[in-house]
Image (spheres, rainbow, N blue to C red):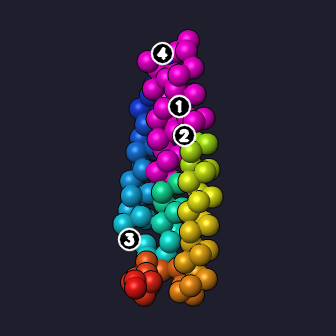
């Protein structure tokens, strides 16, 4: 039995939907960041799967995945720095408390 692309795409779709749900329902910025990373990881899985099944001898999808992982790491570092600065000024990382930062 050959493993087709659908066996990879269904879990990736479930991961992406869980990430969207988590991002939209959470108020904590750390939880929102984790949900965003979950969505980015599902996109990386899609890059690898489409590369494997559409262009089996080439590595473009893998290179896109590595580039996306590098971008996600930089995005996470910047987001955590922003969250730390917000915590220092507001003493809370809930999104609802950000209106206190307005001038």
Q: Residue at x 38, y 62 (%)?
A: 21
Check the image and name the residue furthest to the front. 103
Query: Could you tell which of marks 3 and 4 lies nearer the N-terminus?
Result: 3
- Report helix, strand or loop for mark 1: helix
Q: Which residue is mark 2?
A: 68
Which numbered tag is attached to residue 64?
A: 1
Q: How much space separates mark 3 and mark 4, taking CA atoms?
A: 37 Å
Residue 24: x and y in percent read: 36, 66
Asked if the residue under mark 2 is in contact with the one under mark 1, i.e. CB atoms within 8 Å, the reply is yes
**In the rendered image, is residue 27 in sight?**
yes
Q: Magenta stretch?
A: 38-67
- Answer above or below: position of 12 versus 25: above
**The one of 90 and 32 positioned closer to us in this rendering:** 90
Task: For label 2, count other residues whose C-alpha is less than 10 Å away and answer few (under 14), some (14-19) or many (20+).
Answer: some
Q: Nearer the viewer, mark 4 or mark 2?
A: 2
Query: Could you tell which of marks 3 and 1 lies nearer the N-terminus?
Result: 3
Q: How much space separates mark 1 and mark 2, taking CA atoms?
A: 6 Å
Q: Residue at x 42, y 50 (%)?
A: 16
Residue 90: x and y in percent read: 53, 86
Asked if the residue under mark 4 is in contact with the one under mark 3, i.e. CB atoms within 8 Å, the reply is no
Which numbered tag is attached to residue 25?
A: 3
Q: How much space separates mark 4 and mark 1, taking CA atoms?
A: 13 Å
Q: How much space separates mark 3 and mark 1, taking CA atoms?
A: 29 Å
Asked if the residue under mark 2 is in contact with the one under mark 4, i.e. CB atoms within 8 Å, the reply is no
Q: Residue at x 45, y 83 (%)?
A: 101
**Does the segment drawn in magenta span residue 74?**
no
Q: Which residue is mark 4?
A: 55
Magenta region's main secondary structure? helix
Q: Nearer the viewer, mark 2 or mark 3?
A: 2
């Amino acid at each position: 039995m050959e493993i087709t692309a659908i066996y990879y795409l269904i879990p990736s779709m479930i991961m992406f939907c869980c990430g969207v749900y988590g991002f939209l329902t959470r108020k904590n910025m750390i939880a929102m960041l984790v949900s965003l990373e979950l969505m980015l990881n599902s996109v990386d899985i899609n890059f690898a799967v489409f590369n494997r099944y559409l262009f089996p001898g080439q590595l473009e999808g893998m290179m896109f995945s590595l580039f996306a992982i590098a971008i996600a790491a930089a995005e996470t570092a910047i987001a955590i720095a922003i969250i730390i600065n917000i915590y220092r000024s507001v003493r809370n990382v809930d999104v609802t408390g950000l209106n206190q930062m307005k001038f």
